[in-house]
Structure formats: C-alpha cells, structure tokens
Image (spheres, helix red, strand yellow):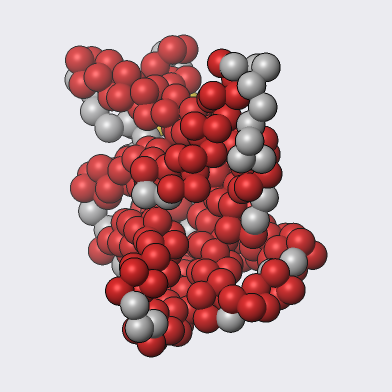
Amino acid sequence: MDDANTSAVKYFIISGISDVHLIHVILFLFVLLIYLLTLGGNLTILLLVCLDPQLHTPMYFFLCNLSILDIACSTNNLNNVLISFLSGDNTVSVLGCLVQIFIFLSLTCGELLVLAAMSYDRYVAICNPLRYHMIMNGRICALLAIVCWVLGTVESIPIFLELMRFSCYKSNVVNHFFCDIMPVLKLSCSDTHFLDHYILTVGVVVSALSPFFMTFLSYIFIIATILKIRSTTGRHKAFYTCSSHLTVVILLYTTLAIQYMRPHSLVNLDSNKLMSLFNTAAVPVLNPLIYSLKNKEVKAAFRRRTRFSFLPNHKDSTT
C-alpha cells in the first residue's frame, strides 16, 4: 500500500445521497417527513399502550420495545442528513462516526431479538393458550426484554473495539448518508480480516440467523396448531393475531439480507445507499402503520382514547 495515499484521519466527511442541490433539498424534506412520521407513529403506539389498560399485555409490551428501538435507530441514522442540511456541515469526528456505527448495530441486533421474543409470545398464545398468562408473566417479559437489549449491545462491542484499532484510511469521505460499517470498511487500509469473519460468522449467525430460526420455528408450530383448528373462523382469528408481526419480520429481514449479508468487498455502496435509506427511514415508520392498520385492538384503543380526550366527562365503559 502506498503511504502517500493513506493517512490517519481526524474526521470523516459524509458524502450523502447526491451533490445536486435540488435533490439534496428534496431528500431533506423526504427524510424530515419520514422522521416526523416515525416519531409520531411510534410515540402514538407508546402512549396508547401506556394509557389503555386493555393493551397491558406481553404482546404490546414488546411492541413498545420495538417502537423505542425504531425511534432511537431513526434518530441515530438520519441526524446526519438533517443536521448537515441545516448547518451546512457534513463532517463527523472519527469517534463520533464509530459510535454511530456501534449504536446502529446494537439497535438493529436488539430489534431482531425483540421480534424473536414477540414470535415466542405468539407461539405461547396460540399453542399453549391455557398457560399463556402463567408463562408470559411480567417477570419473564421484563427478563426477555433485558436480554434483547443487552445481547444487542454485547454483540456489537467487538466490532466497535476493532474499528477503534484502525490506524489509517485511504480517504476520509464516507460514501453514505450516515456512518455505516460497510463504507467505513471500504475506506480502511488496516487489516479487516477479523471484522470480515466476525460479521459473516458471529454477526450473521448470532445476530441475524439465531433470532430468525427462533422466529421461523415459532411460526412452524403456530401454523401447525392453526391447521388443527376445525372452524374456518377460528383459523382466521388465530392467524390474524400473528399477521402484523409476521409482516414486520418479513419486511425487516428482507431488507437486511439484501443490504448486509455479503462480504464488504462485494458491496456496491451507491446502490446500497438506496436500500439503506429504505431500511433506515421507511421500515421504522411502516411498523406502527402495520400494527395500527392490521390490528383491531390498537384501532379500538385509539378510538377509546380519542373519544375520551374529546369527551373528558364521558366514562369509558370499555375500561
């Protein structure tokens, strides 16, 4: 490697999606709209679950965790687009960039684990309904949520420590709209073999495939149980309780598989930015929409809360 073309850098420049001013303005407005919708949708879910006693169930407890993860992930990833447009400064310190990568990976791993916990909750509810409240009690739900958050963080620590060890980069221009691990690895002139193997083994097997197989096995048992239900109405009702979660799982795993399950040497960063924008901006805003539009309990809770707000003297007979 020619030393003249490599150096230790003190900050990174986030290139963004496009250098064209008009496209930059349109992108800013799009990201701002999506971010506001993400905040509004997920905060609405959080408020509904907190205020409505009928939503005080394990399923909605995990949904609250999913909403918090979506809000945090969107804030972490989209702040570069919003701040750089408003301030005109698209630089970020090396440490700030690596911290952003660490937070993103931790939240993404945590989200996959929370979705796996939600699939287990649906498995117990459908396959073992008589013992549901005993198995999915408050202590177990809290323990599962803590494990999801802690494991997501722990799995990302080796990546962060290894990135901190990097001593030189070919350039300080990150070809992305936020600090993601793939474009940073592309820039590094340090040895990346450890991270390559870690991402393709521990990262994929532990962070992605393990919760995926947990979710997949849960749905195998769920589908087998649903097929044993004799009445069409009963089968439809049982499947309907899982449809929102299954839709979110398919959406998230599909985008992550396309984006990350490749060696970084094979990644086309320009095309990857568009997929990353969808994964970062659109998926978090789709989650509350999916759960609100496809879930009768959430829609009923929203009607009860809004009616109670506009008619404060009216007693909510459903609670």
Of 8 and 114, nearer the camera is: 114
Q: Quadrant of the N terminus?
A: bottom left
Residue displayed at 34% across by 62% down: 250
Residue appearing at x 25%, y 19% in the figure: 26
Q: Quadrant of residue 240?
A: bottom left
| Quarter of the figure with residue 239 | bottom left
Q: Nearer the viewer, residue 157 or 106?
A: 106
The relative height of residue 89 versus residue 211 in the rendered view (above or below) is: above
Q: Position of residue 187 (x, y in %)?
A: 39, 49
Q: Residue at x 59, y 37 (%)?
A: 48
**Image height check: is 303 above or below 311?**
below
Q: Position of residue 133 (x, y in %)?
A: 70, 69
Q: Farthest residue in the top direction? A: 87
Q: Report the front residue among 273 and 140.
A: 140
Give percent across and percent down for residue 104.
53, 48
Q: Is residue 237 left or right of residue 66?
A: left
Mark count = 0
- Tell me the residue at 45%/40% (across/down): 299
